[in-house]
Image: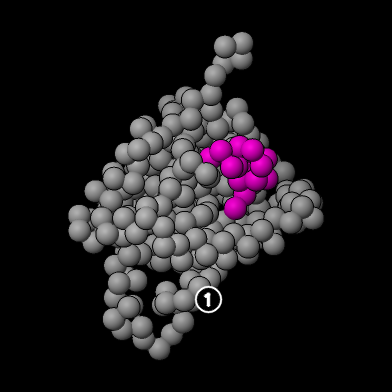
Amino acid sequence: MGKWLKSTECVQFDVAERVVRITLNRPDKRNAINGVLLRELREALLEADDLKSVNVIVLRGAGKDFCAGYDLVTTYSDRAAEQVDPGEYRGTVRSFDDDCWSMERQAETVNLMADVHKPIIAQVHGNCLAGGTDLALACDMVLAADNARIGFPATRANGSPPAHMWFYHVGPQWAKRLLLSGDSLTGRDAAKIGLVMDAVPADELDAEVAELARRLSFVDADLLSANKRIVNLGLELAGARTLQRLAVENDARAHQSQGPRRAQFKADMDAAGLKEALKRRDEPFGDGMIKLRARGE
């Protein structure tokens, strides 16, 4: 190895006892996704897959959150600049196809997680929202803190998930319940409906993930790969890879919306900044949390 046994700008890479821990490392930005983070995450995943000393990958976030979504400040400011000077390259968001092109490039990193031969465990704590769910739900298994917050509130005014594993984890009714409202679930309730594999107290999450990774790591990498790939082939037979392409196109279509709430969000961004725009977007939804009833209630 050599080039990746070190931290980079947005990703930390640590190898020990057949397990690599890839840590999203923008804690001051709640690990929000930007172009640099995506590029470095892609390289880290490929490096982990190449390493003979690694059998299992853990994806986690530094600081208080797993990942709070895409860095909207960067996204919107970049797009505003592109309207003035679109430059010589594709990716400037001026049309439906430009938007698809840009998001397809972003989706390459998310889709890579299924193609990586080694199992990937998502270790979710704090906020796992919007683009953060794109990353977590693309992993092979998701373990969450029981007080984690998981959802896609951006569907209220900003678009639709450009990566879509929701249907495959929870089925059509819960996928619609979550995406049509933008409401979120705690990790505990997410485990009840199958959105994550299991949830544990936050102070036990590190140990729980470490033990699962340890157990998997004793299996030869080629056997892990064989078993991961047959399950993923089942997902492909159920249309999962095709749906990822359609999810990007559907998100681009949603971005073309001229509806009042989307227009208001853009106006609030320009006038008051991201924090105030998010506050105004989410105010009608209260705390925005789905609370599952215990059986018998």
x, y (%) of residue 191? 58, 30
Q: Which residues are magenta?
A: 164-178
Q: Which quarter of the figure has residue 109? A: bottom right
Between 47 and 162, the one nearer to me in the picture: 162
x, y (%) of residue 116? 64, 59
Between 7 and 282, the one nearer to me in the picture: 282
Q: Indicate the quadrant containing the C terminus: top left, top right, bottom left or bottom right.
A: top right
Residue in the picture at 23% in, 61% down = 270
Residue in the picture at 67% in, 40% down = 171
Whether residue 209 is visible to the viewer of this picture, yes or no, is: no
Residue in the picture at 48% in, 41% down = 181
> Magenta segment, principal secondary structure?
helix
Q: Indicate the quadrant containing the N terminus: top left, top right, bottom left or bottom right.
A: bottom right
Q: Vertically, is 144 above or below 93?
A: above
**Residue that sits furthest to the top in the current view:** 296
Examine the structure image and report whether residue 107 is included in the region drawn in magenta: no
Whether residue 262 is visible to the viewer of this picture, yes or no, is: yes
**Residue that sits furthest to the bottom in the current view:** 88
| Left or right placement of residue 61 versus residue 223 in this view | left
Between 66 and 256, the one nearer to me in the picture: 256
**Residue behind mark 1:** 97
Residue in the picture at 28% in, 44% down = 279
Q: Secondary structure at mark 1?
A: helix
Between 29 and 227, the one nearer to me in the picture: 29
Q: How is the image coloured?
A: one colour
x, y (%) of residue 195? 59, 37
x, y (%) of residue 36? 39, 66
Amino acid type for the residue under numbered disc 1: Asp
Q: How crowded is the residue under tag 1: few (<14 C-alpha within 10 Å), some, or many (20+)?
A: some
